Structures are given as C-alpha cells and as structure tokens.
Amino acid sequence: MASTAHGLAPINRIFPEPVSAATDEQLLQWYGGVPRPGSWVRFNFVSSLDGAATLEGQSGRLGNAVDQHVFQLLRRLGDVILVGAGTVRAEGYGGDLLGAEARKWRASRGKPEHPAVAIVSGSLDLDPGSAFFSEAPVRPLLFTSAAADPARRKELAALADVVDAGRERVEAAGIVHALAERGLQQIHCEGGPTLLGSFEAAGLVDELCLTVSPLLVGGSGTRIARSGGDYPPQRLRLVQALESDSMLLLRYIADRPAPAGSPAELG
C-alpha cells in the first residue's frame, strides 16, 4: 500500500468530489471552512462499527495513525480545545497538545501558538498534581457550576481560571457564552459522551467529525453521547467523507439555515 509523506496510508476523499491521497494543506482547507461567523461548536469522536465509543476504556484504541493525524490537524483550527474531566482522566491528557509543526502553522496565520484549553467538571473531581495542570502549555479554563464544592474550587483556582457556567449544573450554553466573551469562537470538543450529550440536549452541536473504525468490539461499551433525558432528534448533513485503510472519517454539520449573508458552502 502506498503511503503519504508522513508514512501514513493515503487519505482519499470520496465525497463530495473524489480526491486521492489528500495533502495536509487540502485537509486543513476542507475542515477549515464553516458556514457562518460567530461561535461554532465542533465535536470529534471515534466509534466502532458496532457503536462502541471506547476499546479497553479508551477511545484512542479504536483509531489508527491516520485517525490520530487528522485529530491533530483539527486541533490546529480551534480557538479552544474543550474536553470533559472524565476524558482527561481516561485518556491521560497532559503536556503540549500540539507539536512544533502545528504551533508554527498557527503562528504563521496570526493565531496563538497553542489554542486555549478548557475542561468541564461539575464535581471538580480532578487531581491538582496531574500532568494536565502541571504540564499545561497555557493556563487552563475550568468550567463548573456555582454549586461546586468551595474547597475544591479554591484548590483548583491556583492552577486554572475557574468559571461558573450554570447554577446547579454546568450548562452548554454557559460554556459557549463564556468562551465567546473571551474571543474563543471556534470550539473544538474532544469528548466525552456526557459532554456531547449535554450539547446535544441544548441544540448546540454545529458539527460532528466522526471516525468510523473498521472494528467489531462487542461488550457493553458506551455510545459517543450520553444524557439524562430525552430531547428532539437533530438532523445533521453529511458534507465530507474520507477513507483510509477501511476507516471512514465523516464530517456532518447541523442541518439548519445559515444566517443571511453567510457562505452557503463549506471550504
């Protein structure tokens, strides 16, 4: 099998127009277009063919090198990387989340070398000594609720900017509003299922980038979204499909009209 300059299997676009062996520049252009100005919430997830969101407790085990490469490219595009506390614990977040090439790419386009990083935790059940805090390349934002434990809040406030995004629980709308106030409008969310479920319930998922791994894993693993209540289904529209080594990388956007004057098509 042929490989790219990165030693990866070729990434081929099969929709909308077929393109063989896409370059990083093409991928960044395709993913970079959004159909309207203002806040834009993108979620990035991976799922097995039979619907599991994790393998052996980690989502990363479902992917491969191509999935991880695109995952890293998507990080370049965001103003902020948003992640739930459970995912931070399970996936071992810590240190610089972007490599040197990615930081150089952002700087060349007038962006901060590293996007802001935000974590969501209603309980504040986080280890202050973890690499997420001790090796953070930028001071993190920590979204919680006004009802969070005051002692935990005080301890973590020494390491992160603690922001209330709701009274009794963390609310998706509060997160988006607080980020927009800080000029962080391109929101790149990396999980987990509870975070996606809360944004789904609030109708605030603008985009879902879903990698479908060619694996059947069985078991009783969770889905990519989890919530405590029912809400109307939200229709998304497929705008891009990539394929590499039997893995599909799908891009969907919310099927709702863009404001007047916004571009009709994604770049």
Image (cartoon, helix red, strand yellow):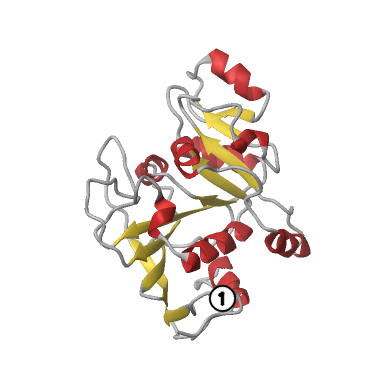
Q: Is residue 39 visible?
A: no
Going by the picture, which residue comes out furthest to the top? 151
Image quadrant of residue 222? top left
- Which residue lies at the image location 27% right of the left edge and 47% below the top edge? 232
Q: Residues within 10 Å of mark 1 (few under 14, many from 20)?
A: few
Q: Is residue 54 left or right of residue 32?
A: left
**Secondary element at tag 1:** loop
State the residue in front, 265 or 69.
69
Percent x, y of residue 29 = 59, 73
Q: Is residue 51 left or right of residue 134?
A: left
Q: Is residue 164 above or below residue 58?
A: above
- Location of the C terminus (image quadrant): bottom right
Percent x, y of residue 169 = 43, 26
Q: How many marks?
A: 1
Q: Is residue 54 left or right of residue 159?
A: left
- Which residue lies at the image location 58% right of the left edge and 40% below the top edge? 118
| Badge 1 amino acid | Gly
Q: Is residue 108 above or below residue 115?
A: below
- Location of the N terminus (image quadrant): bottom left
Q: Is residue 154 above or below residue 116?
A: above
State the residue in front, 81 or 21.
21
Q: Which residue is mark 1?
A: 7
Percent x, y of residue 50 = 24, 59
- Which residue lies at the image location 73% right of the left edge and 56% below the top edge? 111
- Which residue lies at the image location 38% right of the left edge and 69% below the top edge? 238
Image quadrant of residue 195? top left
